[in-house]
Image (cartoon, rainbow, N blue to C red):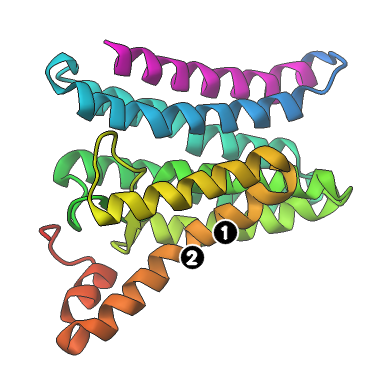
Amino acid sequence: MIAGLLTAANLLCGVAALGLTTVPAYLGWPGPWVPTAVWLIVLAGIVDAVDGPVARRLGSGRMTWGAEFDALADIVSFAVAPAVLVVAASPPSALPVVLPAAGIFVLAGAWRLARFLRTGPGVGRGRFAGMPVTGAGLLVAAWWLFTRELDQEGLFPAGAVGAMSVTALLMVSRLPYDKFPELGGWGRREQVKRVISALAVTAIAVRPALVGLPVALLYTLSGPVAALLGRQRAPGGEAVMEQMKGGPDEP
């Protein structure tokens, strides 16, 4: 029940972000609506990071359709809302490039979530196959906050197109991406993930607009780096090559 409420909060944040990105501009309402929409996407990301571990921790109280509900919330908050944000924040002259990139980004996110529902994580305990949609959406939001903080908002459309294009490829790939640390897990890997997560969260809390983007970029790069390191360790790199080519989902 608690996990379901968290997922509902994630979805509502995404819907509110969509509304604030589009409706005020259409009706001519004054106010900083886009910044509020971006922070709602960030809030949705925080909630999404918690609801999965909570659902697994509470196990017996989890909804049988919790994964499907979570996927629907994620496609709204981290694919559709960021894509609409990029379109709304771009000049009309850029739309011939921005619109296709936004469409591909949403399709890749939907593909990624549908594959997850069908096959599961796919690369072993504590990891996802392919970049999570949450990470991709938060990268776009972090880029908007970064350019606004530096008063370089004119750079946002081009950078956002690049971010959406790269993360679309990473979402449909099978490169390994770490999950959020499990609640109650005390293995060495979970402890390391907790320390890294705590440092990242602390840094973001101090200067969210400046630190959020580097953290999001590091997570984006973590999948390719983990694949390359795994290829070096594995004889011939067969396991990692299967991940990169779209091989079997089994660990």
The image shows residue 171, relative to residue 227, as above or below, that is above
Is 70 magenta? The answer is no
Total of numbered circles in the picture? 2
User: Residue 108: x, y in percent?
Assistant: 40, 49
Instruction: Count neighbours of disc 1 (C-alpha within 10 A) and say few if under 14, some if 14 to 19, many if 20 or more.
Output: some
Q: What element carries label 1?
A: helix
Res 221 label: 2
Tell which of 66 and 203 is nearer to you.
Answer: 203
Residue drawn where x is 65% and y is 52% of the image: 213
Q: What are the residue bounds of the magenta stretch?
A: 1-26
Dividing the image into 4 quarters, which one contains the N terminus?
top left
- Give the alpha-carbon distance from disc 1 to disc 2, as whole Å: 6 Å
Instruction: Count neighbours of disc 2 (C-alpha within 10 A) and say few if under 14, some if 14 to 19, many if 20 or more.
Output: some
Residue drawn where x is 59% and y is 17% of the image: 16
The image shows residue 85, relative to residue 33, as above or below, that is below
The answer to whether the residues at label 1 and label 2 have Cβ atoms under 8 Å apart is: yes
Which kind of residue does numbered mark 2 sit on? Answer: Leu
Q: Left of 114 or right of it: where is 100? A: right
Q: Is residue 30 visible?
A: yes
Q: Left of 205 or right of it: where is 73? A: left
Tell which of 42 and 30 is nearer to you.
Answer: 42
Is 22 magenta? The answer is yes
Q: What element carries label 2?
A: helix
Res 217 label: 1
User: Residue 45: x, y in percent?
Assistant: 50, 33
Dividing the image into 4 quarters, which one contains the C terminus?
bottom left
User: Residue 233: x, y in percent?
Assistant: 23, 83
- Among all residues in the image, which is located at the extreme bottom? 236
Residue drawn where x is 39% and y is 18% of the image: 6
The image shows residue 221, relative to residue 21, as above or below, that is below
Q: Is the magenta stretch mostly helix, strand or loop?
A: helix
Q: Can residue 91 be seen in this view?
A: no
